[in-house]
Image: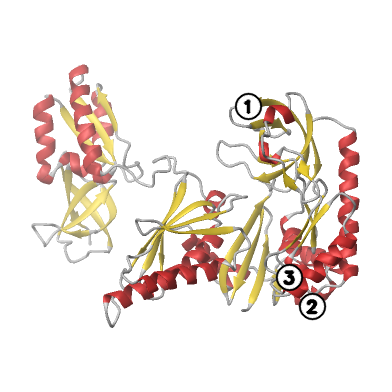
Amino acid sequence: MLKEILINVGEEETRVAVLEDRQLVEMYIERAVSQRLVGNIFKGRVENVLPGMQAAFVNIGLEKNAFLYVEDAVPARAPEGQPALSGANIGDILRPGQEVIVQIVKEPIGTKGPRVTTHITLPGRYLVLMPTVDYIGISRRIESDRERERLKDMAARLKPEGMGVIVRTAADGVEEEELRQDVQLLSRLWRKIQQRASHGPVPALLHRDLELVQRILRDVFTEDVARLTIDSRPEYEKVLDLLDITGPKLKFKVFLDERDDLFRRYGIEAELERALKRKVWLRCGGYIVIDQAEALTAVDVNTGKFVGSTNLEDTVLRTNLEAAVEIARQLRLRNIGGIIIVDFIDMQQEEHRRQVLQVLEEEIKKDKTKTNILGITQLGLVEMTRKKVRPSLSEVLQRPCPYCDGRGKVLSEETVGIHFRNYICDLARRTSADTILVEAHPLVAARLIGSGGGNLRDLEHRTGKNLYIRGCQGQHIEDVSVRPLYDQADIQANTLPVTPGQVLEVRIEEPHAVNLHDGIARLDGFILDVEGAGSLVGEVVPVEVSRVHRTYARARLLK
């Protein structure tokens, strides 16, 4: 598998794309206005303890207090380093006003503050140092039993007394001296953090994790990466300087490409646009739909345009197999975390269900983020969980719609029209004005006017008022402006957008529905019936307004 890393450095954001066989699988974005918090270490003060939730809120100097669960607060038990959870009570461990050193393990999301732990971890290139736990762990991705034993023996010799280490995947095959340098570097860092914590104000930031590019070099840029390309010379030089210290063997894989369109040339920009859409098309013609809710993410698989060539069961199997691969990629790319429910197309054969689950499990293994497949429910749904430590791609790049409050839907023109028809009747009873002006989106305006003005005439009959309904292209479909007009000059200025004799340039949108010889143009939803323009659809033509009615105007072509 060909693995590449692309780094795009801009003035306001840095973006990192990870590609496998030329296909985008992971995306990291860091912006100057929203620095990453996970990994940062603080000295904080316990604000309050909640026995009913077995948790505490800790003031670490951010906008929202951090949340500390009991399992993240109990002292580690030597030598295994497992938390002593049995019978632990948050009130026995923490008290209001107590000072604690904590590390952020989960970014603040929405209304929730960051989640923190007292079990500090300091990641290096080959090892993770755990100053509060006496423990040795080996990455599960190192599969050779012989190599695992070799690394475990070295870790036991090198780790500081009373501390723990986790050997990372990147340590596979490295010499003891490289591990020793990592341990020494991380031990010095921990001593500095302790010195800063021993004096100074509370709350205070004791240690900030590395910036995005440095973290990528530490966590992602391993021996299996064939190429790292970066489009900024200053950042390129920083990368080479850092690799001189941490990984000189990898320097020859780093390339500088200062052209402006690095991401576009690799198709990253287009892939990012697709990653923000609900529907993802599969190569076979089927598609999946991804809906991210607050409690869980639902993924639905459909055959779409794929009809197969042999039988229904084969069509379903091929669609589900391709969907399984794409779902695993989309979870990584969109960085979706939490509970995930996948509704594959129903399969009759147990062997086919096993095949789809096996493919999904194999693809999930490529993901560094901890993901568990819990199996198939009685309803045939696949349950999964994926650890969430940072905002998803959509949370970084998007915001809730200010019009629909994130529902993703707006009211139909029929619904809005019915609602405001009643509102107009109510206003007519309360005002002494003879004229009412209604400004609405063209679709809503057309609904209020009705075919041939029938709805408008009926509404005027019910209210006893003169109604002028104007379509405004810039108006949101759910917003309708209704106001009485008292002054005659105000009526003239606001009711009709054109006057007889006015010369305009308009675009002919469609032929007249009845008289095909004429063409229809619109001015913010107001209809212009242009004589003799039925064959000029799509063209912009000069016209002169000849007659003006309340719902439309007549015009003639100018030669």
| N-term-proximal mark, 2 vs 3 | 3
Q: Residue at x 44, y 58 (%)?
A: 277
Q: Nearer the viewer, residue 118 or 451?
A: 118
Q: Secondary structure at mark 3?
A: loop
All told, the count of numbered labels is 3
Picture coordinates of residue 333, whole percent (x, y): 55, 62
Q: Residue at x 35, y 41 (%)?
A: 476
Which image quadrant is residue 43 in?
top right
Q: Nearer the viewer, residue 53 or 262?
A: 53
Q: CA distance from mark 1 to mark 3?
A: 43 Å
Q: Residue at x 9, y 40 (%)?
A: 454
Kind of residue at disc 3: Thr
Question: Dividing the image into 4 quarters, which one contains the N terminus?
Answer: bottom right
Which image quadrant is residue 194 in?
top right
Position above or below: 260 against 495: below
Task: Quickly name the residue at label 1.
Answer: 50
Q: Is residue 465 left or right of residue 178?
A: left
Task: Quickly name the residue at label 2.
Answer: 252
